[in-house]
Image: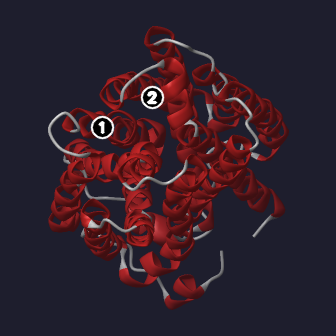
Amino acid sequence: MNRSLRAARVATFVYFILCGTTMGTWVVHIPAIEERAGVSHATLGGLLVLLGVGAFLGMQAAGRLTDRLGARIVVPATGVLCSAALALPGLPRDPWTLAGALLVFGFCNGCLDVSMNAHAVHVEKAYGRPVMSAFHATFSVGGVLASLVGATTASAGLSPAAGMAAMGALGIVIALVSAGALLPATPTPADTAWVEETEQTPATERRRSSGHIWLLAALALMVMLCEGAANDWSALHLKDILGAPASTAAFAYGTFAATMTIGRLLADRLVARFGSMAILRHGATAAAVGITIVALSPWMWAAFAGWALFGLGLSGCVPQLFSAAGHADPSAAGANVSRVAGLGYVGMLAGPAVIGWLTHLVALNHAFVLLTLLCAITTVAAGTLRTEPDHTPEMATSSH
């Protein structure tokens, strides 16, 4: 394995951490931002629609730009923009300016998300074996870091605006420093057998590829809506339903993000051995059990356990969908990833608005039953990933 490829992989890890940290920083400050702007849970749910709209638009723009200009240009540029936009949601004192801040932040975050995932697909091609889940694990690492920093700054009485601006400034430096290690172009695969099996499809399959991409996108919508619910409502669930203080409530999201990280660090090896369909099916089943515990349990320790199982179950699902989309057509990896990620992140960033609207009818924890249903549907539909690469034993046991 040459040094430049390893450096590109490390740089990709860095950008995934950066993206996870910027999003996590927003998430852990939601209760304080909600209070500062004077909005209710239901109004916040509506404002999250704009976050999702911005992300979707950013993803579509970044997908085309990445295919045209290359990830080496687009990834660092969007990393800088996303970091700079992080400070915006911490400033508003009314719903209208908060709406504008979330729209801009969502757009920039969506641009970074798609461009870095497209680059991750190219790195995975070069390695010739599954590595996508490990990249997504570092996204979750960013969430854990944001949870720890957010809890610390909240306890110290630091305002959301100051904390988010400081994290954004650090992110700009990191995005610029890491740019030089990215791959300059689509690399030649290190293991041609694996890439041929995953990318060189018959002509009849190519004609159906567009429909298959949108099917992957629909699954991503359901899975990532569940993930978004944890991002946007886990801290509020412990604070408002179970009466936890804000510093303790922040660790609900941290627990979820930590188990997401553990699951994704293990998932590449499991995919190589059992296949992506098994990871999606069993993961969605475990997530359904976890969120049901959260919805029904009145005990704080059980809620933490439920969020942990929810994160562990969902951890391997999204990387398999993104990887399948990116490998479907090497010449359009950015565009295909943008379709799956775009619809998926509409679920993650805007879909939780449904949870907010449901709070008009039922308690927040009971609204989570919807997520149980979505996980169950994903379990049944996991067969869409039935076409698996036939990994060799050497690949399945190689380190990454």
Instruction: Give how far across and how far down residue 101 sits, in percent.
Output: 53, 17
Residue 134 falls in image quadrant? bottom right
- Residue under the point 62% across and 51% down: 147
* Closest to the observer, 297 or 211: 297
Q: Is residue 171 left or right of residue 296?
A: right
User: Residue 291 at x, y = what percent?
Assistant: 30, 63
| Front residue of this view, candidates 176 and 262 | 262
**Rendered image quadrant of residue 111:** top right
Q: Is mark 2 on a helix, strand or loop?
A: helix
| Residue at the (23%, 61%) spot, across then down | 375
- Residue 144 appears at what percent x and percent y? 62, 56
Q: In which quarter of the image is the C terminus?
A: bottom right
- Percent x, y of residue 377: 16, 60
**Residue at the image point whose x is 21% and y is 60% from the top:** 372
Is 103 on the left or on the right of 167, as rendered? left
What residue is disc 2 on?
A: 55
Whether residue 190 is visible to the viewer of this picture, yes or no, is yes
Check disc 1 and report the residue beneath it: 351
Residue 337 higher or lower than 399, as above or below? above
Q: How many residues crowd mark 1 within 10 Å: few (<14), some (14–19), many (20+)?
A: many
Comparing marks 2 and 1, which lies closer to the viewer?
1
Is the image coloured rainbow, by chain, by secondary structure, or in one colour? secondary structure
Mark 2–mark 1 Cα distance, whole angstroms, equals 12 Å
Please tell me whether residue 398 is drawn above or below residue 389 in the rendered image: below
Looking at the rendered structure, the kind of residue marked 2 is Ala
Q: Which residue lies furthest to the top in this view?
A: 96
